[in-house]
Image (cartoon, grey):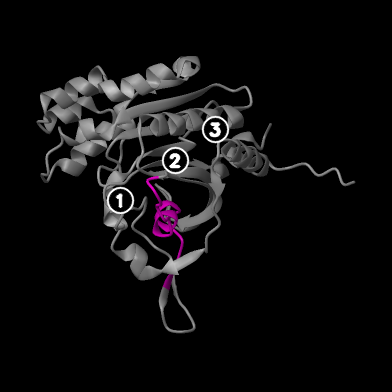
Amino acid sequence: MLNVRLRPEEEAALNLRALYDAHGYSFYRMSRFEEYDFYAGKKDFLTSSNILTFTDINGKLMALRPDVTLSIIKHMKFIDDVPQKFYYDEKVYRVPKNANTFREISQAGIECAGNLNTRDLREVLELALLSLKTIASGRKFILDVANAAMIAELVPETQSRNEILKCIAEKNIHELKQLNADEKLVALMTSPKLDANTISIIDSLNEYHEHIRIDFSVLNNLNYYNGIVFRGFIEGIPESILSGGQYDNLMGLMGHKNCKAIGFAVYLDLVERGFSHD
């Protein structure tokens, strides 16, 4: 029998798949590409507006998959209000932040959609924490949590909207004040407080309290997220390794009216970079 040592990325992927499978999520396998038109009208919901395209032999303009969530939602079928729960281990093709070229990015994660309740939201948040714990292997980890709806109410549809969101992401309180941001927004950034429903979910995760932090700088896309948002960090990895939240608005755009959805992605390429030297 061969003694094959798995790379950190491979080991993390196998452990995460076992975790999601144990919680009743079904594995979802998808094509690497879709018709370009499928993504063209939904760029507000993509991490990057750049899409890698090619022309198929039949003349159709195709796109290498820049996003997993959109592809999964496209093929979801809802029966008797039973939530659809999937996990995946896939590659996406996009231009990462602060990069100038396309990259193949490995990620795993889950998507949960349908007639969701507080219990479903709690389960996804717990799975995000368990994902971090699984990958961390004893290292410290933290999950920053916020609520996009609270920010949306305080950020007007003005020319300075993107600048305000940039200040929130950078925790730039001084610049927020210079932009005449709502005083309630400034107060929320300096003394972060969550809504009652999100607090009740966090309170129910008793054993993880030391790993949860309220931080509104995790929000970076009000077009995509509309409820709970979160981002995970592991000691030794300089950027967030997990990102997710509620995206009910996208469900409506995809034709699933009155449906809620929540999910997250774990960026496995960061696992490779952060643990390969161990």
**Judging from the image, what secondary structure is the residue with disc 1 in?**
helix
Q: Which residues are magenta?
A: 62-81
Outermost residue toward the front? 80
Residue 144 shows in this picture: yes
Q: Residue at 62% across / 22% down in the picture?
A: 138
The residue shown at (49%, 36%) is: 241
Is 88 placed left or right of 3 in the picture?
A: left
Q: Which residue is mark 2?
A: 264
Q: Residue 266 appears at what percent x and percent y?
A: 51, 40
Graded by Cα atoms within 10 Å as few (under 14), some (14 to 19) or many (20 or more), the crowding at tag 1 reads many
Left or right? Give the position of 35 relative to 127.
left
Q: Residue at x 55, y 47 (%)?
A: 26
x and y percentages locating residue 72 in the rendered image:
44, 55
Task: Say the numbered circle drawn on residue 250.
Answer: 1
Q: Quadrant of residue 13?
A: top right
Question: Which is more toward the observer, 258 or 163?
Answer: 258
Three-letter residue code for mark 2? Phe
